[in-house]
Amino acid sequence: MKVYLDNNATTRLDDEVFKDMVPYLTEYYGNASSLHIFSKETTLAMNNSRETIANILEISPDEFIFTGSGSEADNLAIRGIAKAYKNRGKHIIASPIEHPAIKNTLQDLIDDGYDVTILPVDKNAVVDIKALKDAIRDDTILITVMHANNEVGTFQPIEEIAKIAKENKIIFHVDAVQTMGKVPIKPKEIGIDLLSFSGHKFYGPKGIGGLYWRNGVRFGSILTGGNQENHRRPGTSDVASMVGIASALKKAVSNLKEEFQKEEQLRDYFEDEISKKISEIIVNSKDVKRLPGTSSITFKYLEGESILLSLSVKGIAVSSGSACSSDELQASHVLLAMGIEPKFAHGTIRFSLGKYNTKEEIDYTINTLVEIIERLRNISPLWNEFKNENKERI
């Protein structure tokens, strides 16, 4: 059996979404920026896709920018604000659990002379609101906090943060890559100024993302080229992918509540069974609201890479953290920020469920995982040392 439990990294392209895309890969291939007859259908499809997404988000179509990915959307947002408002200030506030697309961009800005305050989070990876208020300065131009974390799934109090940002006339950016298509998001209603997301997280195509940019917020150009995307993101329009992301989002939001409940129930069943059958584990952020399909489990006294590879041999795909940083042999910055000891953080696996997963697959994963953990612990010096010191406990 093959089981895919890495949906936070990417999802399978929905069959119906693919069908919607095909005509714009073959029959209607004209450049949407051209004026001749071959661009008529592609221009119409691009405009309709933009309008579909705008209607879902309850924003104006001219406030939406198609991008090549969620990471690009994050970069356009962070760098665009930094450039446009540098004369007002160079102070930015962020959380320590941001995706590398934010984390590394902020580091780049620090190297360019910007000042970045990183807020603390609690043991569940929730941002400290008091620390946020205390961090605000006269030269603060931007607050950037993700909607829900990609590793442990924790939702952030973005409504409260948006209110604080508005009261202090600070621009607020939200990375919604993990939440778009999974929960309702109305940026204007919440008070978000910029919102990033990516199509391949909700069964759309890879290589296409989106950025909401509220009218009235200044934009500092980062890319140079043609006049596409209202002069904000040059490059020949990938109309097929635009059609795909709009189709996928429309389909996702039509079934939000049901899909949320299904994935949450399956995840809770998985965690309950694993907790019964395997000792010395931590289910991270278990007691707070999380993404329904995200389960981050720390297996003490083991290395996550060994678990991941052992599961892969059995046909089960998981992650040791964010897919964009899981090839680095270092403890997750998210888990460390939560206060998890480095020696335990290394033994953490992220299981991320999606709409195609079944109970049969979860049962197979549970049984396989029990066998793998037992085998790996039997040859683990750390586990044997712990076991000898805690004979009565085990």
Image (cartoon, helix red, strand yellow):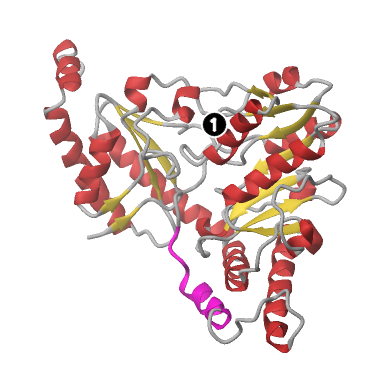
> Which residue is found at the position 29% from the left and 39% from the top?
274
Magenta segment: does it hold 191?
no
Q: Nearer the viewer, residue 335 or 229?
A: 229
- The quadrant of the rendering that contains the N terminus is bottom left
Q: Is residue 324 above or below residue 118?
A: below
Residue at 16% across, 15% down? 385
Q: Is residue 167 left or right of residue 298?
A: right
Q: Position of residue 291 (x, y in %)?
A: 51, 45
| Classed neighbour count for the residue bearing mark 1: other residues with Cα under 10 Å, few (<14), some (14–19), many (≥20) | many
Q: Is residue 33 visible?
A: yes
Residue farthest toward the top in the current orientation of the protein: 389
Q: Which residue is mark 1?
A: 97
Which structural element holds mark 1?
Answer: loop
Percent from the top left, x then y, of residue 28? 61, 84
Farthest residue to the front: give it: 225
> x, y (%) of residue 95?
61, 29
Task: Please state the total of marks drawn on the protein image.
Answer: 1
- Magenta span has 13? yes
Q: Is 7 on the left-hand or right-hand side of 218?
A: left
Residue 394 shows in the view: no
State which region is magenta: 11-24
Quadrant housing the C terminus: top left
**In the image, residue 35 above or below residue 197:** below
